Amino acid sequence: RRLESAESRFATSPDVWNSLFGATKALLPPSLLADRAKMQALAVFSQPVIRAVDALVGSTNVMRLDASTPERTVTALHRHQDLEAAVGIATAAFVLELLRRPPRADASADAA
C-alpha cells in the first residue's frame, strides 16, 4: 500500500490554550520559534501558570491522526488527560491499525 499522506493534529481543553498556541505562532518570528533553547526556556517559564490553570479548570489533550491511501482515508482520535500519553498512545494505535490491515494483492515492493 502506498500512503499518500499522513497528518496529525493536536488540541487541548480549555480552548484558551489553543488560542494562545495560535497567537504565539502568529506573533513570534519563525527564527525564535525554531530556537530550541529559547522555546524550552519559554516552556519552563510557562509551566507553573499552565499547571495552575489546569488544576482549577481541568485539562484534556486530543490527538487526531489522518492517513490517506489512493483508496481511502483513515482518521483516529485519542483523548487523554496526559499530553505525552495522548501523543504516544494515539500514534502507536494508529500505526498498529495500519499494520493490521492486509496488504493489497497488487501492492508494489516500494509501497509504504
Image: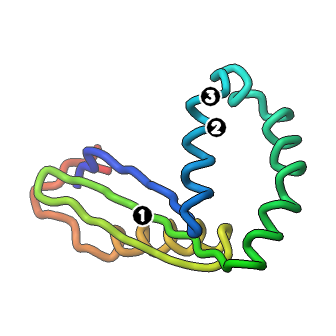
Q: Secondary structure at mark 1?
A: strand
User: Badges 1 and 2: C-beta atoms under 8 Å apart?
Assistant: no
In front of the other: label 1 or label 2?
2
Q: Secondary structure at mark 2?
A: helix
Q: Is 80 drawn above or below residue 108 in the view shown?
A: below
Q: Secondary structure at mark 3?
A: helix
Q: Is 26 drawn above or below residue 1 in the view shown?
A: above
What residue do we see at 62% from left, 57% from top? 17
| Amino acid type, callout 3 | Leu
Q: Which residue is mark 2?
A: 24
Q: Position of residue 110 (x, y in %)?
A: 29, 44
Task: Sort mark 3 into few (<14), some (14-19) or many (20+) by Cα contacts within 10 Å.
Answer: few
User: Badges 3 and 1: C-beta atoms under 8 Å apart?
Assistant: no
Q: Is 93 drawn above or below residue 64 in the view shown?
A: below
Labelled disc at residue 64: 1
User: Badges 3 and 2: C-beta atoms under 8 Å apart?
Assistant: yes
